[in-house]
Image (tube, helix red, strand yellow):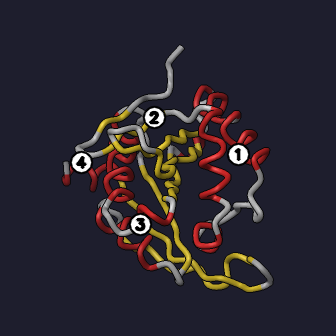
Amino acid sequence: MKHPPVIETERLILRPFSLEDSTFVKENAGSEEVYRNTMGMPHPYLEENAVEWISGHPLKFYQGKGLELAITLKSGELMGVVGISVSKAHNRGELGYWLGKPYWNMGYCSEAATALVEYAFEEMGLHKITSRHFLHNPASGRVLEKTGFAKEGLLRDEYLKDRSYLSVAVYGLLKTDYSGMA
């Protein structure tokens, strides 16, 4: 049985999560700044949310439904997550990520996203990867652009979060476009 990968970049190691990571996930995913910029994350974020989320990763990977990896420095310091959810029927994935606030604006997210996109195209055989971000978070759009994604559109008032409607920018990257970049 194939195991989730460990992916190494110039500065990072992307590795499967362990239950020992649950405190970090609770504290960082539970921060107001991370919550404000992510879709579908509970708030407050409890330790049991982190344990349940981490516990579901192996099955998701083995069923071919996606991959969630911890973003760590080579020293082992955990910073965040990069993941991809897979739609087998459409041979497409959706990229998502977040970093703890102390690690913002240092290029870590772009480095991690680029490595996971390469894995998704080369090892998972995906045809297309999409991603989206709230308009109030343009830094996430910069991550996607640095990773090679092109803006494909705008979904107005797509999400209802904290009693406010939020619009999202949608990005996409085809394997054929990625192959030309590699």
For the residue labelled by badge 2, is the local secondary structure a helix, a strand or a loop? strand
Q: Label 4, label 2: how many angstroms apart (C-alpha)?
A: 24 Å
State the residue in front, 127 or 44: 44
Give the amino acid at mark 1. Ala
Residue 70 position in % (x across, y down) = 49, 42
**Amino acid identity at mark 2:** Arg
Distance from label 4 to label 1 (Cα)? 35 Å
Residue labelled with disc 1: 50
- The residue closer to the viewer here, 81 or 89, is 81
Hey, which quadrant is residue 77 in on the image? Answer: top left
Q: Residues within 10 Å of mark 1 (few under 14, many from 20)?
A: many
Label 3 residue SS: loop
**What kind of element bears circle 1?**
helix
The crowd level at tag 2 (other Cα within 10 Å; few <14, some 14-19, many 20+) is many
Residue that mark 4 sits on: 179
The span from disc 3 to disc 2 (Cα, nearest Å) is 19 Å
Q: CA distance from mark 4 to mark 3?
A: 28 Å
Where does label 3 land, which residue? 104
Q: Residue at x 54, y 42 (%)?
A: 68
